[in-house]
Image (spheres, helix red, strand yellow):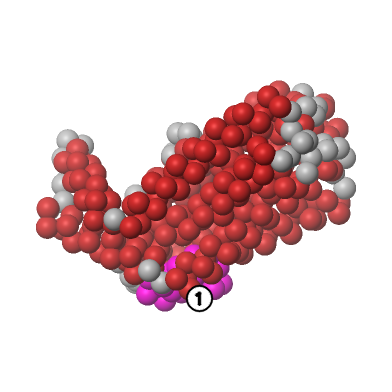
Amino acid sequence: MEIRRRHVAAGVLTWVAVFAVFILLAGPTEFVDAATNLSQARLAGILVMNALGTISMGLTLYTVSRGAGLNVSPIESVFLNTTVNLANNFTPFGQASGLPAGGVIMSRWTGQSFEKSVAALSTKELVGFTPGILIMLFGGSYIALFDATIPERIRSPVTVFTVSIAAFVLVLALIYRNPDPAHRVIHWVVTKLNHGIGYVPRLSKVEEDEIQRRVDGFSDSIEEISTNKPVVIVAATLTTFATVTQGVLLWIALGGVNVDISLALVVFIVPVSLLASAIPTPGGSGGIEAAQIGLIFAMTGGQRATIITAVVITRGIIYWTPIAVGSLTLAGIQFKKWWLA
């Protein structure tokens, strides 16, 4: 899968439509008034946190790529990671459809196989769940049991959510200890998708032996990375830092529009809201923002307009950073391809 003009158009138009709706909900005048309350120091802090998060996730990709045997430098990884995020923002279902496009980009840049590139990206995404799960698990437990600042009506849903996360962690642990069933499931899914491709015009099915080879290559690359404990530890640490930076930049923005909320609570809300990226819009546009707005409003009772303003500004910066940087990177990849042709 490649990023085409229709993907770019759909991503941009969806983002504009979604954010226009949020601005209308806040009230255009109220939105502008709240946005102008952000001081230059706070805006600078937001941009610095966003840059640190971008670099941290790029270094995460570098860590897992080196573990997979891909020859990329730290700087290359930072820029390549923005192209992957660009693919996530311009294709529906977020990472589910963005990963194949990102795999094509990495494969072209590194000259390595598509399966190895996708394995590195998949591992980065899986490791990226680690800090979010830990924050949701331990943060949710603390909020449900000890935090006296949240309304009582919120405590029960937080408790149920935390128990669900604990069950999810248990399932992941079972899969990790028993990888063979997971391998069979992946092969079954790919085979079914390949069978369906035969009914699509201008597309042809892949031979069964080729499917087996690709699935085996993907699984072997995943196992090679996941069993390298130093790689996993470093990658998990970097993604944890990146998750915290997103929480900090949102907290800075909320403080700038006079929404009183603790930093710990915002850091908890960020990974929870990212679960909404699964909605079928480019980059999950609308779902993440709605989740953050709803959770912050439920837990603080603050003014709707100021909360929407803070979320829209921070999410806009996070959304457009990979588009700006990733587009330049894609142009560089195309130039490299032309130069070597």
Residue depicted at 77% across the width and 36% down the height: 148
> Which stretch appears magenta?
57-78
The answer to whether residue 67 is above or below residue 138 is below
Does 68 appear in magenta? yes
Residue depicted at 37% across the width and 75% down the height: 69
Q: Nearer the viewer, residue 155 or 214?
A: 155
Does 46 appear in magenta? no
Q: Which residue type does callout 1 highlight? A: Ser
Can residue 222 be seen? yes
Report which residue position mark 1 lands on: 73
x, y percent for residue 172: 40, 50
The quarter holding residue 109 reads: bottom left
x, y percent for residue 260: 83, 38
Q: Left or right? Give the position of 86 relative to 65.
A: right
Query: Badge 1 local density, few (<14 within 10 Å), some, or many (20+)?
Result: few
Which element type, helix, strand or loop, lies under badge 1? loop
Q: Left or right? Give the position of 236 relative to 217.
A: right
The answer to whether residue 169 is above or below residue 51 is above
Q: Left or right? Give the position of 12 relative to 172.
A: right
